[in-house]
Amino acid sequence: MVSRETDEVVIAPSTDVTGEDILRRAVKNVEPEALVYHDDFRSYGVLDGIFNHQSVNHSAGEYARGDVHTNTIEGEFSILRPWLSVFRGVSKEKIFLYCAQFQLLRSIRAMDMTTRAVSLFGVA
Protein backbone atom coordinates (compact mmCIF):
# COMPACT_ATOMS: atom_id res chain seq x y z
CA MET A 1 0.00 0.00 0.00
CA VAL A 2 1.14 3.53 -0.75
CA SER A 3 -0.39 6.78 0.41
CA ARG A 4 -0.51 9.29 -2.44
CA GLU A 5 -0.69 12.12 0.11
CA THR A 6 2.17 11.18 2.45
CA ASP A 7 4.19 8.70 0.32
CA GLU A 8 4.02 6.29 3.27
CA VAL A 9 4.68 2.74 2.11
CA VAL A 10 3.38 -0.50 3.66
CA ILE A 11 4.90 -3.65 2.20
CA ALA A 12 3.87 -7.08 3.48
CA PRO A 13 4.38 -10.40 1.70
CA SER A 14 1.44 -12.75 1.18
CA THR A 15 1.19 -16.21 -0.29
CA ASP A 16 -2.56 -16.18 -0.83
CA VAL A 17 -4.35 -12.84 -0.93
CA THR A 18 -7.91 -13.33 0.24
CA GLY A 19 -10.65 -10.84 0.98
CA GLU A 20 -10.06 -11.44 4.68
CA ASP A 21 -6.36 -10.65 4.28
CA ILE A 22 -7.11 -7.45 2.33
CA LEU A 23 -9.68 -6.31 4.90
CA ARG A 24 -7.37 -7.00 7.85
CA ARG A 25 -4.53 -5.01 6.26
CA ALA A 26 -6.80 -2.17 5.15
CA VAL A 27 -8.37 -1.77 8.60
CA LYS A 28 -4.90 -1.75 10.16
CA ASN A 29 -3.24 0.67 7.70
CA VAL A 30 -5.87 2.82 5.94
CA GLU A 31 -7.66 5.81 7.45
CA PRO A 32 -11.46 5.25 7.41
CA GLU A 33 -12.08 8.36 5.27
CA ALA A 34 -9.38 7.50 2.71
CA LEU A 35 -10.17 6.72 -0.91
CA VAL A 36 -8.71 3.35 -1.93
CA TYR A 37 -7.73 2.66 -5.54
CA HIS A 38 -7.18 -0.90 -6.74
CA ASP A 39 -7.41 -3.15 -9.77
CA ASP A 40 -10.21 -5.59 -10.59
CA PHE A 41 -8.94 -8.43 -8.40
CA ARG A 42 -12.09 -10.06 -7.00
CA SER A 43 -10.97 -10.09 -3.36
CA TYR A 44 -11.14 -6.28 -3.19
CA GLY A 45 -14.95 -6.60 -3.17
CA VAL A 46 -14.66 -7.09 0.59
CA LEU A 47 -14.07 -3.32 0.87
CA ASP A 48 -17.66 -2.54 -0.20
CA GLY A 49 -19.51 -0.66 2.52
CA ILE A 50 -16.37 -0.31 4.66
CA PHE A 51 -14.05 1.89 2.59
CA ASN A 52 -14.68 4.34 -0.21
CA HIS A 53 -12.92 2.60 -3.11
CA GLN A 54 -12.67 2.66 -6.87
CA SER A 55 -11.06 0.26 -9.30
CA VAL A 56 -9.68 0.02 -12.80
CA ASN A 57 -10.47 -3.04 -14.86
CA HIS A 58 -7.13 -4.27 -16.16
CA SER A 59 -8.69 -7.37 -17.72
CA ALA A 60 -10.81 -5.07 -19.93
CA GLY A 61 -7.80 -2.97 -20.92
CA GLU A 62 -8.55 -0.10 -18.53
CA TYR A 63 -5.44 1.11 -16.71
CA ALA A 64 -6.37 4.64 -15.68
CA ARG A 65 -9.49 6.74 -15.35
CA GLY A 66 -8.53 10.19 -14.10
CA ASP A 67 -7.07 9.74 -10.61
CA VAL A 68 -8.16 6.09 -10.49
CA HIS A 69 -5.09 3.98 -11.28
CA THR A 70 -2.65 1.58 -9.64
CA ASN A 71 0.50 3.19 -11.06
CA THR A 72 1.63 4.40 -7.63
CA ILE A 73 1.86 0.95 -6.07
CA GLU A 74 3.13 -0.61 -9.28
CA GLY A 75 5.91 1.99 -9.32
CA GLU A 76 6.80 1.05 -5.75
CA PHE A 77 6.94 -2.62 -6.70
CA SER A 78 9.22 -1.76 -9.65
CA ILE A 79 11.68 -0.39 -7.08
CA LEU A 80 11.26 -3.31 -4.66
CA ARG A 81 12.06 -6.06 -7.19
CA PRO A 82 15.56 -4.83 -8.20
CA TRP A 83 16.29 -3.87 -4.58
CA LEU A 84 15.58 -7.47 -3.53
CA SER A 85 17.69 -8.89 -6.38
CA VAL A 86 20.95 -7.66 -4.84
CA PHE A 87 20.47 -10.14 -2.00
CA ARG A 88 20.85 -13.04 -4.46
CA GLY A 89 18.00 -15.08 -3.13
CA VAL A 90 15.55 -14.38 -0.35
CA SER A 91 14.09 -17.19 1.71
CA LYS A 92 10.33 -17.38 2.13
CA GLU A 93 10.82 -17.51 5.90
CA LYS A 94 12.75 -14.21 5.95
CA ILE A 95 10.97 -12.22 3.21
CA PHE A 96 9.02 -10.23 5.80
CA LEU A 97 12.32 -8.88 7.19
CA TYR A 98 13.45 -7.69 3.77
CA CYS A 99 10.05 -6.08 3.21
CA ALA A 100 10.26 -4.34 6.60
CA GLN A 101 13.70 -2.94 5.76
CA PHE A 102 12.51 -1.74 2.36
CA GLN A 103 9.45 -0.15 3.96
CA LEU A 104 11.67 1.69 6.46
CA LEU A 105 14.07 2.92 3.77
CA ARG A 106 11.20 4.17 1.61
CA SER A 107 9.49 5.92 4.53
CA ILE A 108 12.60 7.90 5.54
CA ARG A 109 13.90 8.67 2.05
CA ALA A 110 12.71 12.30 2.04
CA MET A 111 14.14 13.17 5.47
CA ASP A 112 17.31 15.19 5.81
CA MET A 113 20.24 13.43 7.51
CA THR A 114 19.67 14.99 10.94
CA THR A 115 15.95 14.21 11.04
CA ARG A 116 16.69 10.68 9.84
CA ALA A 117 19.30 10.14 12.59
CA VAL A 118 16.93 11.42 15.28
CA SER A 119 14.10 9.30 13.91
CA LEU A 120 16.14 6.11 13.74
CA PHE A 121 18.52 6.44 16.67
CA GLY A 122 17.10 9.17 18.91
CA VAL A 123 20.29 11.22 18.62
CA ALA A 124 21.03 14.59 17.08
Image: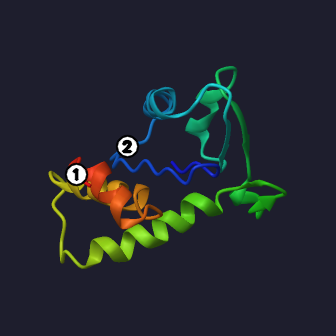
Residue 37 at x, y = what percent?
Answer: 67, 46
- Count of numbered marks: 2
**Crowd class of label 2 (few under 14; some 14 to 19; many from 20; radius 10 Å):** few
**How far apart are the two marked residues, 2 and 1, measured between alpha carbons?**
41 Å
Residue at 36% in and 77% down? 82
Amino acid type at image mark 2 = Asp
- Identify the mark at residue 78; answer none if there is no mark: none
Considering every residue shown, the one lying at the far right of the view is 66
Mark 1 lies on residue: 123
Type of residue at label 1?
Val
* Closest to the observer, 43 or 106: 106
Quadrant of res 98: bottom left
Residue 35 at x, y = what percent?
70, 37
In which quarter of the view is residue 63 placed?
A: bottom right
Measured from the top left, where is residue 34 in percent x and y?
66, 34
Query: Quick one: SS at disc 2?
Result: loop
**Label 1: few (<14), some (14–19) or many (≥20) C-alpha neighbours in 10 Å:** few
Q: Do the residues labelled 2 and 1 touch (CB within 8 Å)?
A: no
Q: Name the secondary structure under disc 1.
A: loop
In the picture, measured across the screen, residue 99 lies left or right of residue 38, that is: left
Q: In which quarter of the image is the C terminus?
A: bottom left
Residue at mark 2: 16
Residue name at image x 44 percent, y 61 percent: 111
Horizontally, is 99 left or right of 53 in the view? left
Q: Looking at the image, which residue is at 58% across and 48% down?
A: 3
The front one of 80 and 19 is: 80
